[in-house]
């Protein structure tokens, strides 16, 4: 079984690699010190199993696992964590594999033997019960065979585009498979729905203007490449938009 080791601490990675080296049937094919590198390496190396630290700076283990679930060949995941009563209870309740730090051989081999692929819904439930963030900090997109991680803070808006969602961001545009409804729920604190087919980032809104025909138009800050004509606020969402945009 091909294993990818992910932990932001080098000693922890070395410990896991040593345990794998001493265990027949498992081959460490790579290591990563953060979630972003881990997702890219998982896409390239196609490991069978990922040993994944939960609490990492930047992209934590829960978000990393979420992105790995969307890969063409998603790996099975075993979380590694220092003692955290909320996380442990959540993992036990859903029979999700984990090992406590410092990692013991018997527990690791048992977790590897029972490694299973995780459903997105299970990840969200675990994150909530473990008191971890359920909102991603990145959006994962594929373009021309390349995997891209787009920081949510760089995104101007999400717009429905036939059966996909277009992500307009500081470095261009990408298409993703996520539903607009799910994105609206996940990023409700930072994005506002202006009509059925568009979510706009509050941080990028410069002002709201009235059009010649009396409609309300969201104008983004300079630097955005999004056509303002796409950002008309519908009557259905006008009252809520006014509430959220008060003072803009």
Image (cartoon, rainbow, N blue to C red):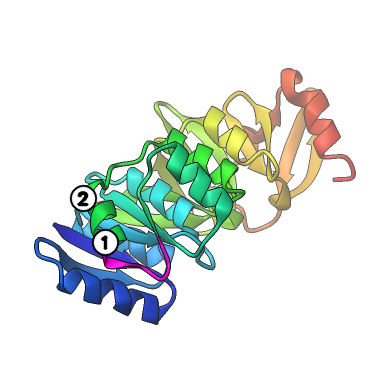
Where does residue 203 sit, x and y in percent of width and height? 72, 52
Where does residue 148 sit, x and y in percent of width and height? 38, 56
Q: Nearer the viewer, mark 2 or mark 1?
A: 1
Q: Residue at x 52, y 37 (%)?
A: 125
Q: For this view, does 104 lie left or right of residue 201?
A: left
Q: Which residue is mark 2?
A: 113
Q: Quadrant of the C terminus?
A: top right
Residue, far right: 247
Q: Which mark is residue 50?
A: none
Residue 246: image quadrant is top right
Q: How far apart are the two marked residues, 2 and 1, measured between alpha carbons?
A: 11 Å
Q: Residue at x 67, y 32 (%)?
A: 193
Residue, far top: 236
Question: Does residue 212 appear anywhere in the picture?
Answer: no
Q: Quick one: label 1, few (<14), some, or many (20+) residues within 10 Å?
A: few
The reply to whether the magenta stretch includes residue 103 is yes
Q: In the depicted view, which residue is nearer to us: 140 or 59? A: 59
N-terminal of the two: label 2 or label 1? 1
Which contiguous range is marked in magenta? 100-106
Q: Residue at x 20, y 69 (%)?
A: 20
The reply to whether the magenta stretch includes residue 8 is no
Element type where label 1 sits in the image: helix
């Amino acid at each position: 079984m091909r294993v990818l080791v992910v932990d932001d601490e080098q000693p922890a990675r070395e410990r896991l690699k040593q345990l794998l080296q001493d265990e027949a049937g498992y081959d460490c094919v790579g290591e990563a010190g953060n979630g972003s590198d881990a997702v890219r390496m998982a896409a390239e190396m196609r490991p069978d199993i990922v040993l994944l630290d939960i609490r990492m700076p930047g992209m934590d283990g829960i978000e990393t696992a979420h992105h790995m679930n969307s890969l063409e060949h998603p790996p099975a995941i075993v979380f590694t964590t220092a003692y955290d009563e909320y996380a442990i209870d959540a993992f036990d309740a859903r029979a999700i594999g984990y090992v406590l730090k410092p990692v013991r051989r018997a527990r690791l081999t048992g977790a590897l033997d029972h490694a299973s692929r995780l459903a997105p819904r299970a990840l969200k439930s675990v994150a909530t019960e473990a008191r971890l963030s359920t909102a991603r900090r990145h959006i994962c997109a594929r373009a021309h065979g390349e995997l891209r991680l787009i920081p949510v803070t760089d995104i101007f808006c999400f717009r429905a585009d036939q059966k996909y969602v277009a992500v307009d961001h500081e470095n261009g545009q990408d298409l993703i498979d996520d539903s607009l409804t799910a994105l609206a729920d996940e990023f409700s604190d930072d994005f506002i729905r202006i009509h059925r087919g568009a979510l706009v980032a509050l941080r990028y809104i410069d002002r709201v203007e009235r059009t010649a025909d009396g409609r309300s138009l969201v104008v983004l800050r300079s630097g955005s490449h999004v056509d303002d004509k796409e950002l008309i606020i519908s009557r259905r969402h006008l009252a809520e938009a006014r509430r959220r945009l008060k003072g803009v």
